[in-house]
């Protein structure tokens, strides 16, 4: 299937992609919160009417993602297929997952460290204590750049290796779900789950909550690898996680726990 045809199919699927950030991730993420008996990370409240600003930013959020995906498809810079085996779809999911981890870390790091790029990201950091809707509060530029880099990189890789359209879509839906879940200000990753997943679950909801409160560390998405390599993880992340799951929420934004790192 040609890339242009994929672009046409993309528009036919925009209803699904448009509703996904509203219905699927919100219902699943917030259901997970209720069922998992979570612990509050910061014992603080969001600012007044924050949720209204977050909801109002949803059209901008969707427009940025939609245009950022569509333009690389129209440009015809790759060759994706919809005819693939389950194993090939899974392979494609892993490829785009890894690429997303890379592009997200370096753009996120740049937004914080390069002064003239901060304007792109500062809208999202109006959120200090997050809610289930905080993932949507981003500038159009940030969501567009995210979607364009993710899609363009995946399409360019498809010129060298076999990749499917479905693997990309499933990864995007997974990203929407995790993005909503990571902004709930409650820890949903239990010690048992963390023990089973090991290193892959060392970044928990607490990790991103610390990023919003402090804005000086934890720039990665789901995996801890790049933050470990570049030494940009919060030194007391483990101590905070342990305190939270013991019911001892942080009381102030400036509170830090003694680290053993």
Image (cartoon, rainbow, N blue to C red):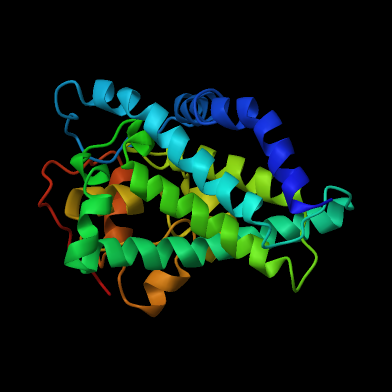
Residue drawn at (31%, 31%), measured in percent from left and top?
131
Indicate left or right for 87 with 93 as reference. Answer: right
Residue drawn at (69%, 43%), measured in percent from left and top?
7
- Along the line of sight, which residue is nearer the eye, 20 or 237? 20
Q: Is residue 134 visible?
A: yes
Q: Is residue 228 above or below residue 147?
A: below
| Residue 175: image location, x then y, percent | 54, 45
| Residue 23: image location, x then y, percent | 54, 22
Q: Is residue 209 above or below residue 48?
A: below
Q: Is residue 12 above or below residue 69?
A: above
Residue drawn at (19%, 30%), measured in percent from left and top?
46
- Along the line of sight, which residue is nearer the eye, 102 or 259? 102
Residue drawn at (63%, 56%), measured in percent from left and top?
75
| Residue 18: image location, x then y, percent | 55, 28
| Residue 106: image location, x then y, percent | 39, 68
Indicate left or right for 209 with 18 as reference. Answer: left
Q: Is residue 219 visible?
A: no
Q: Quadrant of residue 184?
A: top left
């Amino acid at each position: 299937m040609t890339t242009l045809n994929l672009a046409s199919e993309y528009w036919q699927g925009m209803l699904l992609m448009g509703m996904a950030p509203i219905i699927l991730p919100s219902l699943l993420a917030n259901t997970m919160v209720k069922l998992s008996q979570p612990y509050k990370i910061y014992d603080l409240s969001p600012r007044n009417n924050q949720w209204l600003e977050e909801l109002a930013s949803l059209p901008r959020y969707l427009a940025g993602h939609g245009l950022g995906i569509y333009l690389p498809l129209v440009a015809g810079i790759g060759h994706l297929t919809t005819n693939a085996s389950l194993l090939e779809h899974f392979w494609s999911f892993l490829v785009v997952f890894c690429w997303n981890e890379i592009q997200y870390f370096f753009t996120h790091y740049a937004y914080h460290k390069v002064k003239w790029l901060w304007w792109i990201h500062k809208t999202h950091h109006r959120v200090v204590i997050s809610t289930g809707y905080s993932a949507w509060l981003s500038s159009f530029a940030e969501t567009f750049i995210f979607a364009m880099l993710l899609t363009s990189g995946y399409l360019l890789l498809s010129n060298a290796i076999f990749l499917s359209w479905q693997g990309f879509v499933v990864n995007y839906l997974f990203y929407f779900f995790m993005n909503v879940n990571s902004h709930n200000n409650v820890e949903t990753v239990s010690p048992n789950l963390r023990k089973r997943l090991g290193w892959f679950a060392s970044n928990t909801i607490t990790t991103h909550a610390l990023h919003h409160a402090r804005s000086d560390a934890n720039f990665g998405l789901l995996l801890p690898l790049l933050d470990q390599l570049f030494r940009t993880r919060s030194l007391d992340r483990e101590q905070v996680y342990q305190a939270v799951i013991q019911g001892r929420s942080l009381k102030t934004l400036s509170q830090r726990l003694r680290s053993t790192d």
